[in-house]
Image (cartoon, helix red, strand yellow):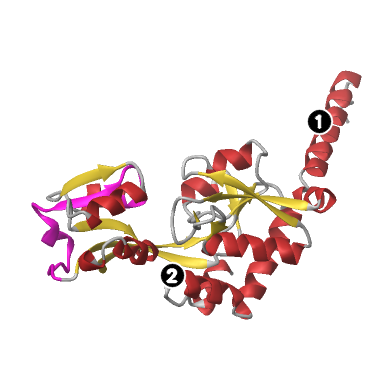
Amino acid sequence: MKKTSPLRLCALVLLGLLSAMAVARADTLEDIRKAGKVRIAIDLAIPPFGMTDDKMQPVGSDVDLARLLAKDLGVELEIVTATGPTRIPLLQTHKADLVVSTLSITPDRAKVVDFSVPYADHPSVVAALKSLPIKQMSDLDGKKVAVVRGTTQDTDLTQQAKGAQLVRYEDDATMALAVASGQVDILATARSLLPAISRKNPARAVEPKITMQTFYLAIGMRKNEPQLKAWVDDWVRANLKNGKLGAIYKQYHGVDIQPDQLLKVGG
């Protein structure tokens, strides 16, 4: 039997200690409870998920979900203001403990963060004025279609609607104003954002015409946090079953989520 050299033995011991330390550090749930607060990253510029009211207070379905989670965890909520591009970096730099901000589950994101059981579905649609007869992608040929740059809708339209004239905007708010003002009659976005877009100018209300694909929204967290993930997963399942998450979604979006389908997706 070959003997392990003292140097190699020391290296193996050190590696084991470092691994143990990494596992020990990866307990954000305990850290949250000790701190008495949970820091949740939320984008407050995507109504009705996140926004501010006339008193500049955070409101929205993601805000209410975060408040309910903090309450059930027995800690205070600290909202960390995020944007689409900063949601995951805020987690990775330990400036936030969780992300509740229209974060859809995708294979690329799953490489760098862990997701909870999904708490809502998030269909991606092509929408337009009710008077426009649009049923399939080919109906977009030669027409201007608004989309937010770099989104999954942008990617899908680029691949599937090659005859359309894509008009790219930097954020949802700017795109909504373009629709309300009559600059464009067709847009690609999340179905849940359509009521807010239509409210900007009821005379130019839009409705979904084509469903491109359905994403599932989940709570994001850093990888290798088994205790936190288990607690959040159990919390989502329980509040889907008791109807609290469905009630929040219905209040802000005007549509029902399907708890059985979400639980099936989440396993």
Residue visible at 67% across and 39% down in the picture? 94
Quadrant assignment for the N terminus: top right
Q: Is residue 214 above or below residue 264?
A: above
Outermost left residue: 142
Number of marks in the image? 2
Left or right of 30 on screen, residue 186? left
The relative height of residue 33 versus residue 8 in the rendered view (above or below) is: below
Which residue is nearer to you in this view: 209 or 2?
209
The image shows residue 158 at horizontal and vertical percentages of 23, 47
x then y, percent, for residue 38: 72, 52
What residue sits right under mark 1 in the picture?
15
The quarter of the image holding the C terminus is bottom right
Q: Which mark is residue 175?
A: none
Residue name at image x 62 percent, y 79 percent:
241
Image position, residue 55 (x, y; %) = 54, 55
Q: Residue furthest top?
A: 7
Question: What whole-number distance in Å separates the C-alpha atoms at marks 1 and 2?
Answer: 50 Å
Residue 27 left/right relative to 169: right
Which amino acid type is shown beneath numbered disc 1?
A: Leu
Q: Is residue 40 visible?
A: yes
Q: Which amino acid does the dot numbered 2 rest on?
A: His
> In the rendered view, does 65 fall on the left or right side of 149?
right
Magenta-span inclusion, residue 140: yes
Q: Nearer the viewer, residue 100 or 3?
A: 100
Q: Position of residue 107 (x, y in %)?
A: 48, 50
> Mark 2 or mark 1, which is nearer the start of the sequence?
1
Q: Residues within 10 Å of mark 2 (few under 14, many from 20)?
A: many
Which residue is disc 2 drawn over? Answer: 253
Q: Closest to the observer: 56 or 207?
A: 56
Q: Secondary structure at mark 2?
A: helix
On screen, residue 16 versus residue 139, left or right, reads right
Q: Which residues are magenta?
A: 131-153
